[in-house]
Amino acid sequence: MICAAAIAWQVHKAKATEQKLAEDAKACRVRAERGDAKAEVQLAYMYSHGEGVPQDYDEALRWRRKAADQGSAGGEDGLGHMYYYGQGVQQDYAEAFRWYRKAADQGDAMGEDGVALMYEQGQGVSQDYTEALRWYRKAVDQGYAKAEYNFGNMYYYGHGVPQDRVEAFRWYRKAADRGDEYAQRVLHINWKGLSTFMKVSLSVTLLGSLMVLTGSLRHRGSPQWEKQRTFAFAGLLGLSYVALDLLGFRCINILTPLAAVYSFQFVKSLVGGTVVALLLSVVLPSSLWPKVIKVGLGLFGMLLVGADIFVLSVFKLRNGVLPARPLWSMNAMLLGTIVPLAIALWLARKRRSEPELQGEVAASDSPASDDGEGSP
């Protein structure tokens, strides 16, 4: 009931927000069609993010070009962003840098941050940490939170400056205080960053685990305890899964090494897959259990292969950049869930084969008559 109420409240808030954004988009379009450059930039942003209007990169590109043609730094910075990420256009770092630089030359902090980032990464221009630092300083002097976070990264990794973690975290704190999500994740203070889906799923898992655990413990010492013991173990593992999920959100950030992220996601999903396997083994009849697990393994396997192909084809081939952390985290989660299900299937088949083997042994031990036929 608590989860249902939370979902209903979130749906109500989402509808109210959507209606408000739709009204803002209509008013913004009226001003944009009159040639208001600020409104053109705002309307382009709404089309890029699907706020108040359906997401449409072509429309976003069109309105940003209109703003840029009037010399708007916001329009120029927006075009740089679209070329950088390949939104509505073919990804082109050189073109992205050109538009970022136009905006930066007007003193636009986002444009300055974009220029600095491209100098740091060597995208669309030769890598130059000195230039990156110079442009980052211009942006942080204007109090731009994202630039403060990126400036902290320069100190964290020692790009163009002596490596200094203390100085890096000083800049992360500045960015976090201005609301930068990445800096807040690095400093482990963004508890509000939990998505609605994650809040609901964790709440359901927590309540379900507590119900399974307390319900099974009531049968301790009774004839049903043998079966309820599996439920109790599943409940404890469910609580462990919730704790691991919250721990990961609290401790794993964008600076955590990829190997640590992969290992954590694998262990967490291993626990989750074990909970599912245990519950299925108790709830389902022994004849149906292997079939259901086999279907689950097939679905997870297809999801693993299909998702990898999608990521490799869309990101690597089209954008030339592979999102390593999301890709490996996804693989770790799927593999961690598959392993306990595969073990459960093996145990189910072994359990089914034991009666058959015992039957064969019993048949071979039965006395035979003189004519070679078995006794009746």
Image (tube, rainbow, N blue to C red):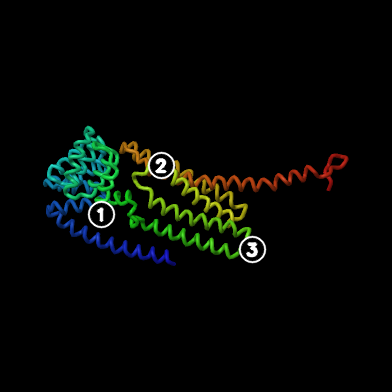
> Badges 2 and 1: C-beta atoms under 8 Å apart?
no
| Mark identifier at residue 328 | 2
Amino acid marked by disc 2 = Trp
Residue 181: x and y, percent? 29, 51
Residue under numbered circle 3: 221
| Mark identifier at residue 177 | 1
Gap in angstroms between the C-alphas marked 2 and 3: 45 Å
Q: Left or right: where does residue 57 sit relative to residue 1?
A: left
Amino acid marked by disc 3 = Gly
Gap in angstroms between the C-alphas marked 3 and 1: 55 Å
Q: Earlier in the sequence, mark 2 or mark 3?
A: 3
Q: Left or right: where does residue 155 sit relative to residue 242?
A: left
> What SS does tag 2 mark?
helix
Q: Using the image as rendered, state which of residue 146 and residue 284 is in the foreground.
A: 146
| Quarter of the figure that contains the N terminus | bottom left
Q: Which residue is drawn at 34% across and 44% down?
A: 255
Q: Residues within 10 Å of mark 2 (few under 14, many from 20)?
A: some
Residue 133: x and y, percent? 20, 39
| Mark identifier at residue 132 | none
* Residue at the farthest top position: 126
Q: Residue at x 32, y 50 (%)?
A: 187
